[in-house]
Image: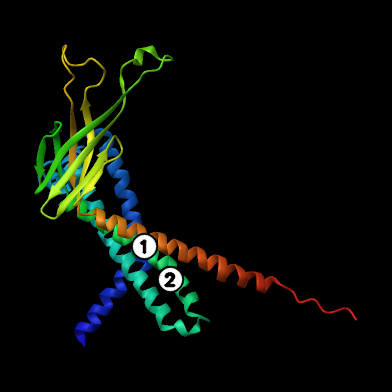
Amino acid sequence: MAVMKLVSRIWQLAGNIYLTMGIIGCMVADLVWGYGKLKVHQDMFIPINDRGFTAWAATWGSESLAITLWLFILVGLMALLSINTFVCTTDRVFTLVRFRYRFKSWWRFCLRLGPHVMHYAMLIMFLGYLVSYLFSGTHLGKILLPEKSIFVNGVKITLKQMDIKYYEGTRMPHLQGRVIDVKAAILFEDALGKSFQTIAHNRPAIFRGLSVHLRDFSPKYKGMGMGGPPRQYINVTVKQDPGMKFYFAGMGLFILGLFMYTGEKLFVTKPAAAAKRAVPVEEVQ
């Protein structure tokens, strides 16, 4: 019994609204502090995008705590806010389930859960960000030549073809012969199968948790090649991000919750409010 009381007490404290306000206030103060550090030491935080948070924390982050401590505090505050949100949302869901008999139909009860579904969706997306920061890996400067392959985490990546479009108009002669668009056909292969995809700028390819992003390419214009045919290649960044599954799951759940919330407003709340405003008209004798 003593253990159950302790767990119940901790649960109540974790879902306290004053704890929520305190966490948010601390986050605001911490972000103001971090903004000042970012303005002066921006180069200190750039490697996070290339190396990942774990590798960065073990090197730059831990060696310059006077500059980076605010970020570690922010991560901790976000974890506390996630726990607080989960407890508050779960308490509300349990209350709705306990009094579900008060709803006139099961679908009205389901629609009432819409905001809480969106809260759970946000928590799943936060979990995705945490997984990405802790376990993602980035492989920079991978050069792919036509019909040549590289191997990343057991996946064979082959450049099959490049589709290059040059500017051939007359309105901007200084761009004549310059590349205006490039696409690359990529073949992914592993023990489970293969996939043929196309990448371009702002259009990565995704396979088995890997995402391939186009960074650079050659040639940049016609005739580039010292008298011979231009040498073709692409420079790609390969990212391993296990948090993507959580992103997509969270976004799908959030959209579902948004539809549920909108349905409640349109088909339950709005008609009920209109019915209350309606005044019966007596028949004129």
- Residue on which the image places disc 1: 253
The answer, for residue 93, to whether it is visible in the render is yes
Question: Where residue 93 appears, x then y in whole percent?
Answer: 38, 75
Q: CA distance from mark 2 to mark 1?
A: 12 Å
Seen from this angle, which residue lies furthest bottom? 1
- Residue on which the image places disc 2: 113
Q: Is residue 95 left or right of residue 45?
A: right
Residue type at mark 1 is Leu
What residue is rendered at 23% in x and 56% in y? 76
Q: Nearer the viewer, mark 2 or mark 1?
A: 1
Question: Where residue 152 appears, x then y in whole percent?
Answer: 11, 44
Residue type at mark 2 is Leu
Q: Is residue 162 left or right of residue 91?
A: left
Classify 10 Å Cα crowding around label 1: few (below 14), some (14-19), many (20 and above): many
User: Where, quadrant-wise, is the C terminus in this rendering?
Assistant: bottom right
The answer, for residue 67, to whether it is visible in the render is no
Classify 10 Å Cα crowding around label 2: few (below 14), some (14-19), many (20 and above): some
Q: Is residue 26 left or right of residue 263?
A: left
User: Where, quadrant-wise, is the N terminus in this rendering?
Assistant: bottom left
Q: Does 226 sit above or below residue 245?
A: above
Question: Where residue 162 appears, x then y in whole percent?
Answer: 23, 31
What residue is rendered at 41% in x and 59% in y? 255
Task: Indicate the secondary structure of the residue bearing disc 1.
Answer: helix
What residue is rendered at 17% in x and 45% in y? 188
